[in-house]
Amino acid sequence: MLTRPPFQWWSLLLASWLAAACAQANVTLLSTASEIVYSPPSCNNSQAAACAGAWQVIPSPDTAGAYITSTNGPTVGSGDLIPQLFLNFQGTGLDIRTSTLSTATVNVTLSTQDPTISITREVDSAAGLITVIGLPEDLVTTLSLTTNPFPSTTLPPSTVIPSFAPTITIVPVIEESQKQTPADIVAEVLGAILGVTLGALGYAAVQFYLRLRRRRRTQTQTPA
């Protein structure tokens, strides 16, 4: 008899944005944006009596005052449907950020029509950031994200398909300590200024030396 996997396999928390890179600019969408279609429909868990769906809008565990969309898998109230989300967009790339508490395995599918092409990758949402690059900017791409209740083997970090070759990359979240601090930036700026100053002083010293030599040579050649 099949039984449901442990709770942690179901935990998927979409952080507060999905960013689509278009030809002219980057477009950022909150996970609660109307452009994102959730199946079953999402509901706000602050209305506990009316929210029994698989997708729930909850306070973000990472950012105070922000909200994210979360799922722990199928629920009886949602007819045991596997949670999915869909987004149609046009751009050359896509970033999907997940919460640091997310542990779910998800299937990420990207597809286009005319021509009809589809690519699917299984990724671990615990990575924190899923990046898609190499999308056709002249076609509308449909993103489908489906939670996977069963564990599976780890797949390669990227894939390439002829004529439609996006690369889906799982990017670990960068720790704050690895980012440049204001002191590092100031040091770089001061270093650049110091380099320019030393270069200018060196140039001035050479010019002065050349002028001094020319003056002495002129004095030597002048008859007494």
Image (cartoon, rainbow, N blue to C red):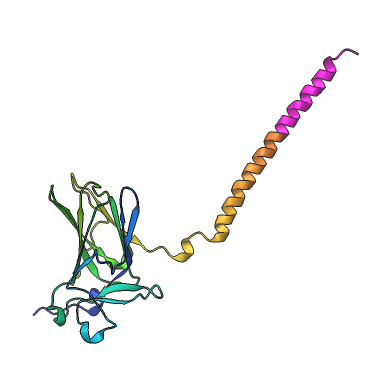
Residue 210: percent from the left, percent from the top? 73, 27
Q: Is residue 17 left or right of residue 121?
A: right
Quadrant of the rendering where the C terminus is positioned: top right
Residue 108: percent from the left, percent from the top? 21, 61
Which residue lies at the image location 72% right of the left edge and 34% below the top edge?
205
- Rendered image quadrant of residue 81: bottom left
Residue 114: percent from the left, percent from the top? 13, 48
Quick one: which residue is furthest to the left in this view? 1
Q: Nearer the viewer, residue 161 or 87?
A: 87
Total numbered badges shown on the rendered structure = 0
Q: Is residue 185 left or right of residue 170?
A: right
- Please name the predominant secondary structure of the magenta segment in the image: helix
Residue 131 visible in the picture: no
Quick one: which residue is furthest to the right in this view? 224
Q: Is residue 176 above or below residue 221?
A: below
Which residue lies at the image location 47% right of the left edge and 61% below the top edge?
178
Residue 134: percent from the left, percent from the top? 27, 48
Give the magenta-colored segment's residue range.
205-224
- Rendered image quadrant of residue 32: bottom left
- Rendered image quadrant of residue 141: bottom left
Q: Is residue 185 above or below residue 74?
A: above
Whether the magenta-drawn stretch holds residue 49 is answered as no
Q: Is residue 4 above or below residue 215?
A: below
Which residue lies at the image location 50% right of the left edge and 59% below the top edge?
180
